[in-house]
Image (spheres, rainbow, N blue to C red):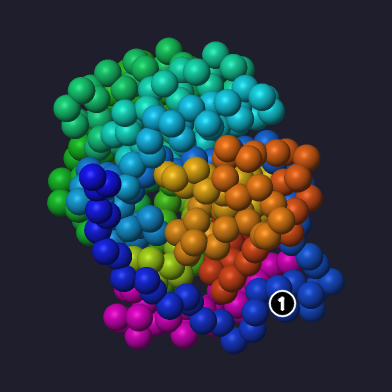
Amino acid sequence: MKKSLPVIERESPARAAIGFDEKLARHNLELRAATVDVLQINVGKLCNQACKHCHVDASPKRTEVMSPETAEQILAAIRRFRIPTLDITGGAPELNHSFRRLVSESRAAGTHVIVRHNLTVMFEPNQADLPGFFRDNLVEVVSSLPYFLQQQTDAQRGQGVFDKSIEALRRLNSVGYGVEDGLVLNLVYNPTGAFLPAAQTALEADFKREMKTRYDVSFNNLFTITNMPIKRFLSYLRRSGNEERYMQKLLDAFNPATVENLMCRNLISVDWTGKLYDCDFNQMLDLGVEEGMPQTVAEFSLAKLNNRRIVTGAHCFGCTAGSGSSCGGAVAE
């Protein structure tokens, strides 16, 4: 019998005073893909945490998990099309049974692998060896840390998360991450409220100084990511009466210089069922790639997906506000 999934209430999308495509047109811009060189896969919503800002609505109670069959279809696409980068996210991707095979087989195919690692999953059963596994496969590790102080981090991610995160970072440092060439450890900062992140360069300098001085922890780069008005963060905006104000803040901060470097221009997102999207945020809103394009990873075709029109919504203003926002942080000066 097919396992039933939890019923998740479908939210109405965020609202803005002007459509995103109309805003682009006023600047004589159109959002189209360039060449796809990143395959970003969400292997499911199962996670050992339930963060307040999570745009995936991930938690320990979620049952949506990528099957081994879909994982094999992803590996087939990587091998056939020689995808330069595989970006693995979740949930906590390490909790998926196919996770280690996806990493090792992609590396064997010559693909660079990025893992969105929440740090505390390292303390789950059978996960203590993750630092060594990451090192052996030269995985680029990207980990969220809301702030370099306990109070702000635990408020966003849960009680006790900060202490575990610091210990996990020390374990990563101990095998060379953030210390040795080729073992890249990046941290991610999300604001804790309805405002835009500070300038990435200045915030990175603060984080590096404080993390080293307070905890003797080193890392390579800090990525600032704007909170997208979807899922849990949108619910927070509506509960606090901040949706209209936040959307206007994003709209007023629209920066046309960010459009050229938006992550959707060189990325395809794959959900736990194998369906294709222009980005991870569109995935969470079930906004698939445009009609006429391959719709699943089993139909993957670079020739068709390159130069496609990007499907947009009001949440896209989050990626173009100020210095811009992507899975790799700010996209413009």
x and y percent of residue 329 in the render?
55, 49
* Quarter of the rendering occupied by the C terminus: bottom right
* Residue 88 percent across, percent down from the top left: 46, 36
* Residue stretch rendered in magenta on the structure: 235-261
Q: Is residue 55 above or below residue 16?
A: above
Q: Mark 1 = which residue?
A: 23
Q: Identify the residue at horizontal 63%, vertical 67% (top origin).
A: 312
Residue 148 horizontal/vertical position (percent): 32, 47
Q: Is residue 303 above or below residue 256?
A: above
Task: Count the labels in the image.
Answer: 1
Quarter holding residue 80? top right
**Could one spot residue 267 in this view of the protein?**
yes
Q: Quadrant of residue 16?
A: bottom right
User: Which residue is pictured at 25% across the width and 30% down the height?
Assistant: 122
Q: Quadrant of residue 287?
A: bottom right
Q: Quadrant of the N terminus?
A: top left
* Residue 117 in sight here: no
Question: Regarding mark 1 in the picture, which secondary structure is present there?
Answer: helix
Q: Position of residue 13 (x, y in %)?
A: 47, 75
Residue 85 falls within the magenta-colored stretch: no
What kind of residue is marked 1? Lys
Question: Does residue 183 sit above or below 143 in this rendering?
Answer: above
Does the stretch in magenta take in 245? yes
